[in-house]
Image (tube, rainbow, N blue to C red):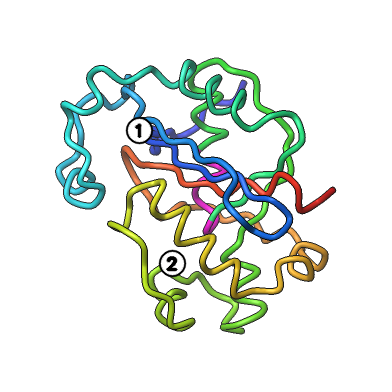
Amino acid sequence: REPFFFDSEIIEIGALKLNAQLEVVDEFKTFIRPVFYPVMNGDVVRLTKIRPQELEGAPDFPAAYRAFRDWCGEECCLCAWGTDDIPALLDNLIMHGLETEDFPCYDLQRIYDQQVAHGNRQWALSAALEKLEISPIGQAHDALNDALNTVQVCKALDMERGLQEYTEPERREKRARRGIGSMDMVLLSEILE
């Protein structure tokens, strides 16, 4: 295996399972005890509002990921806001010696850009909410709240068309997030049936 730079240890997973009408049918949230970066960066604490004490009794990544995959079920695709979360997930799987999976993944920010913004650039979730005149739910940078806000944006899009027209974005060499981070996901478990 080729060595690589590991800069995004996941400390939180928040995910929503949606039906074909983009209604939330289930939710998943867990903190994860970091092992590679056990001391939290102060910027991460300020951004996520997660205190180190909250992670002390949390499961390690392998246990949290197994619980997440069990919750996902066999027939699902992963959708995230932007290009950071899926590569970070794959990096964490590799670093923990877990098998990487080949599940369909979509960057919902790309669909938003194609249908609404037409800027061919990255958009903050907060900027998308503001442009669509949607009130945000909860504290930003909480994985489950970010997933809930991503669903709000999805409901303003033509997701069926967006997923049909989806093309794989060019691979980016650098990810914006550094250090310990959280992962928010929206699972579209029944949209692709």
Residue, disc 2: 125
When asked about the image quadrant of residue 136, the answer is bottom left
Residue found 63% across the figure and 54% down from its top: 171
The CA distance from mark 1 to mark 2 is 20 Å
Residue 108 among those drawn in magenta: no
Q: Residue 14 appears in which quarter of the rendering? A: top left
Residue 84 part of the magenta-drawn span? yes
Disc 1 on helix, strand or loop?
strand
Q: Residue at x 82, y 64 (%)?
A: 164
Q: Position of residue 23 (x, y in %)?
A: 61, 56
Tell me residue 34's x, y (percent). Answer: 32, 24
Lateral position of residue 188 relative to residue 51, left or right: right
The picture places residue 111, in percent across and down from the top left corner, at 65, 69
In the rendered structure, which amino acid carries the disc numbered 2? Answer: Leu
What residue do we see at 69% from left, 51% from top?
Answer: 19
The residue under label 1 is 11
Q: Find residue 36 and name its label.
A: none
Q: Magenta segment range?
A: 81-88
Sequence-wise first label, 1 or 2: 1
Callout 1 amino acid:
Ile
Nearer the observer, 23 or 81: 23
State which quadrant residue 165 falls in: bottom right
